[in-house]
Image (cartoon, rainbow, N blue to C red):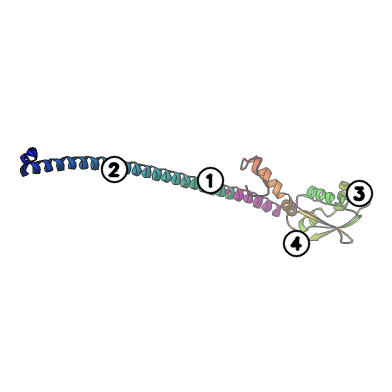
């Protein structure tokens, strides 16, 4: 009791203040520790988020680049194909122009084309239509020359001039009208053009040999 009596109010107050200071230090230290942990976690989360966003941005950039490169490749291929096609069509147009401007100087051509047709057709009686210029230039002896070239001596060939024919060649029909062979040069050009254009493209290095000849290049 004597010790308790000796503790004056000032002493008690001092002890209470001291205890309060100690508790405050404990609380402050705990708060600082917790705040540091929270800050570290927040920084880690921010870095993770930034990293993920950066990775997403890089992935999106890569995808966009791939799409752009693919688009460029497709467009380049389209332009090249269009250019190649234009070149080939100009070649075809030039061939047609030259055929259309023939000056009746192809007797051997008419004989060969007519003989090819009649040699592959049945019957012996045929009507042959040739261009007016060819008929005027080669009419005499033309039927005999065709028969000899075809190797068919019993042929009966009636050769007529047709003003509508251009470019040279011949149209062969049997008398019964059941067989017709259009062996005009322009018609042959149309029939053989897919393969011809392929050969031209390959030989001039416009396309590789493994590219299709009749379709897109």
- State the residue position of label 1: 73
- State the residue position of label 3: 152
Q: Which marked residue is nearer to the observer: mark 1 or mark 2?
A: 2
Q: Work out which residue is located at the far right of the displayed protein and give it.
A: 154
Q: Which marked residue is nearer to the observer: mark 3 or mark 2?
A: 2
Question: Earlier along the polypeptide chain: callout 4 or callout 1?
Answer: 1
**For the residue carrying disc 4, how many other residues have a C-alpha within 10 Å: few (<14), some (14-19), or many (20+)?**
few
Q: CA distance from mark 3 to mark 2?
A: 106 Å
- State the residue position of label 4: 164
From the top left corner, tell me how far across and down residue 117 is, in percent. 83, 51
Vertical relation: 138 (above or below) 50: below
From the top left corner, tell me how far across and down residue 173 is, in percent. 85, 58
Q: Secondary structure at mark 2?
A: helix
Q: Work out which residue is located at the far front of the displayed protein and give it.
A: 1
Q: Which residues are magenta?
A: 83-105
From the top left corner, tell me how far across and down residue 216 is, in percent. 63, 49
- State the residue position of label 2: 39
Evaluate if marks 2 and 4 touch, with contact meaning CB atoms under 8 Å apart.
no
Q: CA distance from mark 4 to mark 1?
A: 47 Å
**For the residue carrying disc 2, how many other residues have a C-alpha within 10 Å: few (<14), some (14-19), or many (20+)?**
few
- Horizontal placement of 170 versus 17: left or right? right
Q: CA distance from mark 3 to mark 1?
A: 58 Å
Question: Earlier along the polypeptide chain: callout 2 or callout 4?
Answer: 2
- Horizontal placement of 139 versus 57: left or right? right
Q: CA distance from mark 2 to mark 4?
A: 95 Å
Relative depth, front residue between 18 and 175: 18
Q: Residue at x 63, y 51 (%)?
A: 89
């Amino acid at each position: 009791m004597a010790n308790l009596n000796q503790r004056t109010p000032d002493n008690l107050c001092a002890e209470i203040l001291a205890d309060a200071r100690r508790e405050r230090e404990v609380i402050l230290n705990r708060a600082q520790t917790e705040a540091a942990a929270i800050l570290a976690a927040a920084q880690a989360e921010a870095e993770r988020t930034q990293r993920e966003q950066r990775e997403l941005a890089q992935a999106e950039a890569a995808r966009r680049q791939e799409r752009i490169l693919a688009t460029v490749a497709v467009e380049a291929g389209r332009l090249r194909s269009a250019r190649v096609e234009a070149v080939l069509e100009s070649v075809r147009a030039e061939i047609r122009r030259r055929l259309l401007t023939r000056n009746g100087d192809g007797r051997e051509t008419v004989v060969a084309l007519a003989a090819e047709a009649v040699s592959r057709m049945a019957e012996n009686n045929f009507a042959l239509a040739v261009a007016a210029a060819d008929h005027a230039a080669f009419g005499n002896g033309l039927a005999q020359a065709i028969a000899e070239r075809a190797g068919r001596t019993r042929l009966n060939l009636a050769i007529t001039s047709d003003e509508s024919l251009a470019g040279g060649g011949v149209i062969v029909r049997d008398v019964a009208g059941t067989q017709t062979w259009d062996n005009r040069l322009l018609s042959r050009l149309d029939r053989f053009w897919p393969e011809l254009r392929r050969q031209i493209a390959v030989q001039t290095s416009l396309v590789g040999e493994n590219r299709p000849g009749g379709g897109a290049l």
